[in-house]
Amino acid sequence: MPNLRVTEIKAFVPAKNFDLSKQFYQDIGFTMASEGGGVAYFHIDGQASFLLQDFCAESLAENFMMHLLVEDVD
């Protein structure tokens, strides 16, 4: 069996409005570390990260879910 040592896994998050979505995630505290080719890489405190994509297929987006736990929502 191969040694598949995982170092990271990221979800591709669809965006109907890419610019508005980028601003939203920055407003709630995520850092946009890079952007190019219709994909923006976001992370927060080295704890969580995802790739926001400038693409949104309704049939796929309707079933997309992301779960983020925080210590204090306030």
Image (spheres, grey):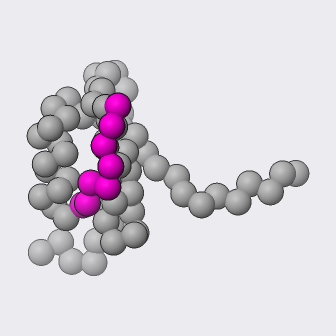
Point 37% across, 26% down: residue: 60
Q: Position of residue 57 (x, y in %)?
A: 32, 22
In the picture, residue 63 is in which quadrant? Answer: top left
In the picture, residue 33 is in which quadrant? Answer: bottom left
Q: Position of residue 16 (x, y in %)?
A: 20, 29
Tell me, yes or no, whether the highlighted magenta stretch contains residue 72: no
Tell me, yes or no, whether the highlighted magenta stretch contains residue 31: yes
User: From the viewer's perspective, is residue 9 above or below residue 35?
Assistant: below
- Farthest residue in the right direction? 1
In the picture, residue 65 is in which quadrant? Answer: top left
Q: Position of residue 18 (x, y in %)?
A: 19, 35
Q: Position of residue 24 (x, y in %)?
A: 14, 50
Point 17% across, 42% down: residue: 21
Magenta range is 30-37
User: From the viewer's perspective, is residue 30 above or below residue 41?
Assistant: below
Q: Does residue 49 appear anywhere in the picture?
A: yes
Point 28% across, 22% down: residue: 58
Point 18% across, 72% down: residue: 73
- Farthest residue in the bottom direction? 71
66 and 52: which is toward the camera = 52
Q: Does residue 62 appear anywhere in the picture?
A: no
58 and 47: which is toward the camera = 47
Task: For the C terminus, give its image quadrant.
Answer: bottom left
Q: Main secondary structure of the magenta part?
A: strand
User: From the viewer's perspective, is residue 42 above or below residue 19?
Assistant: below
Marks counted in the figure total: 0
